[in-house]
Amino acid sequence: MLIWGLQRRGLLLCGLASALLVGCVSKGTYHDLENKYTTLQGQYTSLQQSSAAQAAHHAAELAALKQELAADKGHVGRLQDALGYTVNSDLLFPSGSWEMSKPGQEIIAKLAPRLVPFQRSKLLVNGYTDNAPVGRALQRKGVTSNAVLSQKRAEAVMQYLITQGVKPDMIAARGLGEADPLASNATAQGRAQNRRVEVTVAEPTAP
């Protein structure tokens, strides 16, 4: 709409300029047209400057967001096989829980439409944890190991994807606990990377 408005005002300026050049109008009409032309020209310039300022503002916002995502070790990113996505569990679940947070639901809701093209292939949700033992609070709820916790988290993501349109018979969940770490569990940064949920296309089974 902004571009159309600029184009429209550009056409109006051209039309008024043409009228000024014709020379067959009265002096009063000429001055009226001249004033309108000057006013429209000022508005047009102002809109151009405003558009440039808005574009610069949006560019700055995007740059800041990109830096924030790059610094966030739990960002959503494509897997190397280009057939799936990985999301840090800290963005999806409160600490010591397998119930998705509201921000976590929003992340998965944005992810779901990207998986639609793969609906002819079965999707697999893999849950992973770090190597820290589960706490007593989780144990009292029946979560006795990281494998169980990762399974519950994978199932939670799977169920939410189903609510977002993924076919129930085309998706499965699997908890792998602390297996296959992405980084060393010796540091907090490494453990944060290892707490994740991956959504990928399932490997075909042998006949």
Image (cartoon, rainbow, N blue to C red):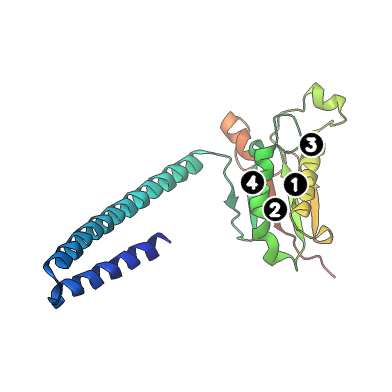
Which residue shows up at 19% across the image and 70% down it? 17
Q: Which of the marked residues, 1 or 4, is nearer the chain's N terminus?
A: 4
Q: Of residues 2 and 36, which is closer to you in this image?
A: 36
Which residue shows up at 68% across the image and 55% down it? 112
Question: On screen, 191 above or below 59?
Answer: above
Instruction: Find residue 199 and name its label.
Output: 2
Instruction: Find residue 157 and name its label.
Output: 1
Q: CA distance from mark 3 to mark 1?
A: 13 Å
Label 3 neighbour load within 10 Å: few <14, some 14-19, many 20+: many
Toward which corner of the image does residue 35 lie, by quadrant? bottom left
Q: Of residues 54 and 171, which is closer to you in this image?
A: 54
Q: Circle 4 sits in a helix, a strand or a loop, which is it?
A: helix
Q: CA distance from mark 4 to mark 2?
A: 13 Å
Disc number lying in front (3 or 4)? 4
Disc number lying in front (4 or 2)? 4
Question: How far across and down, in percent of the image, does residue 162 sit?
Answer: 78, 54
Which residue shows up at 75% across the image and 46% down it? 157
Report how many numbered discs are placed on residues in the image.
4
Three-letter residue code for mark 3: Leu
Quarter holding the C terminus? bottom right
The answer to whether the residues at label 2 and label 1 have Cβ atoms under 8 Å apart is yes
The answer to whether the residues at label 3 and label 1 have Cβ atoms under 8 Å apart is no
Q: Which residue is mark 3?
A: 149
Toward which corner of the image does residue 132 lie, by quadrant? top right
Q: CA distance from mark 2 to mark 1?
A: 9 Å
The answer to whether the residues at label 4 and label 2 have Cβ atoms under 8 Å apart is no
